[in-house]
Image (spheres, rainbow, N blue to C red):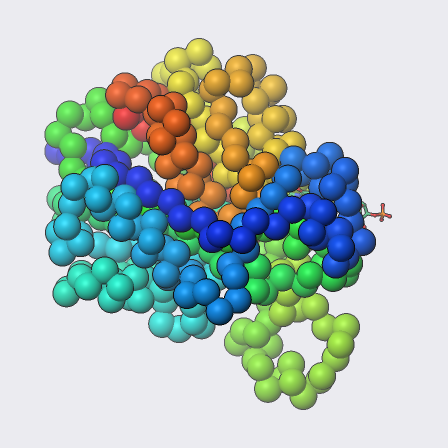
Amino acid sequence: MFNSKIIGLGKYLPKKVVTNYDLSEIMDTSDEWIIERTGIETRRHIVKNDDDTTAVMAFKASKIALQRAKIKPNDIDLILFATLSPDYYFPGSGVLLQNFLKIENCPAMDIRNQCSGFIYALSTADQFIKSGKYKNILVVGSENHSGGLDMTTRGRNVSVIFGDGAGAAVLTREIDLKRGIQSFSIYSDGQHALELSLRGPSTNRWVPEILEENNPDDTTYYPNMNGQTVFKNAILRFSEVIQEALDQNKWSVNDLDLLIPHQANLRISQFIQKKFNLNDNQVFNNIMRYGNTTAASIPIALTEAWEEGKVKKDSKIILAAFGSGFTWGGISLIW
Ligand code: UT7
């Protein structure tokens, strides 16, 4: 019998800081609106002609995580790569990362569950470790949003929110079952698939079709979001999976050392904090600095919390996410 345990964390953020004021110069928005509705002050964007891509950022975060885990790349048995913005339509970014790390032979799998991608990937890693199939697993979340956003007033409800970045975690076997991942729950509800989506180019709208229509009003190849529907569902589903994680462990709210919610919107985190009556030290947020980095948001936040000394031996932690699909999930762990 094994548990799975995180033994190394790393993050990478591209160097270009984009402020709300920068955005207000290219679209009709304002620092006041963005802060009031989302809490975001800055986000990072990949600099054109820099070498950063989704897989390259994942590589930079993974190198740090591996170093901290004291694990050599060739000791990794499986790569799980969560992203909605892979380098290519195919192949997935997992194999690119494997090549950058010069891992000679290990399976690499892309996980396509958007904002919940890291939770799905960690849950998958946990099961492969618990089954005894693999010992060391590298789990990453990485996103390159900035190049694909509609940076005009038309796309402002989406483009002010999202940022680029990557986070990585190395997991290994743990024989003490009171440590490591204690429980996970993952869910989907495809009836809301198009409420937060990017539909073309895809097999539903192949590139030749888009080019042939040549329609300047076509926004299907930008991310589209029905913000209020997503917001309402996020609050509901975040609450459910956090409660489930508490119940699965018989933890009270006071037992919880740290909640790391997917950084979707500071207002969502604040609503959840209030609902569960958590104090400021129990909830970690960094969306103010990085915006919403989708599958990268939880590993970036977990890494930052660890770097700041907020994740300690015996810490009881819950990770929770909600996003496009809709997909959502929660993980409880003891450090
Ligand atoms: O990570 C995946 C999960 N994602 C989320 O959880 C996001 C959930 N949704 C949200 O966070 C919020 O819905 C948003 C932040 C996206 C939008 O906030 P909202 O309070 O729901 O605003 P709204 O979409 O209802 O728009 C209110 C007004 C509209 O103007 P009118 O129609 O009232 O004149 C929008 O056109 O705000 C306008 N607006 C903006 N104004 C300035 C929308 N985006 C902007 C903007 N700057 N960037």
Q: Quadrant of the N terminus?
A: top left
Residue 265 position in % (x across, y down):
61, 38
Residue 315 position in % (x across, y down):
32, 20
Q: Nearer the viewer, residue 192 or 205?
A: 205
Residue 146 position in % (x across, y down):
57, 59
Q: Quadrant of ligand 1?
A: top right
Q: Quadrant of residue 152?
A: bottom right
Residue 179 position in % (x across, y down):
23, 25
Q: Residue at x 39, y 41 (%)?
A: 299
Q: Does 6 sit left or right of 165 as displayed? A: left
Q: Is residue 60 above or below residue 31?
A: below
Q: How many marks?
A: 0
Q: Is residue 108 visible?
A: yes
Q: Residue at x 65, y 85 (%)?
A: 211
Q: Quadrant of residue 301?
A: top left
Q: Quadrant of the C terminus?
A: top left
Q: Does 49 sit left or right of 55 as displayed? A: right
Q: Residue at x 46, y 15 (%)?
A: 253
Q: Is residue 164 above or below residue 89?
A: above
Q: Quadrant of residue 122?
A: top left
Q: Does 254 sit left or right of 207 as displayed? A: left
Q: Does 171 sit left or right of 291 as displayed? A: left
Q: Residue at x 39, y 13 (%)?
A: 255
Q: Is residue 127 visible?
A: no
Q: Is residue 220 above or below residue 84?
A: below
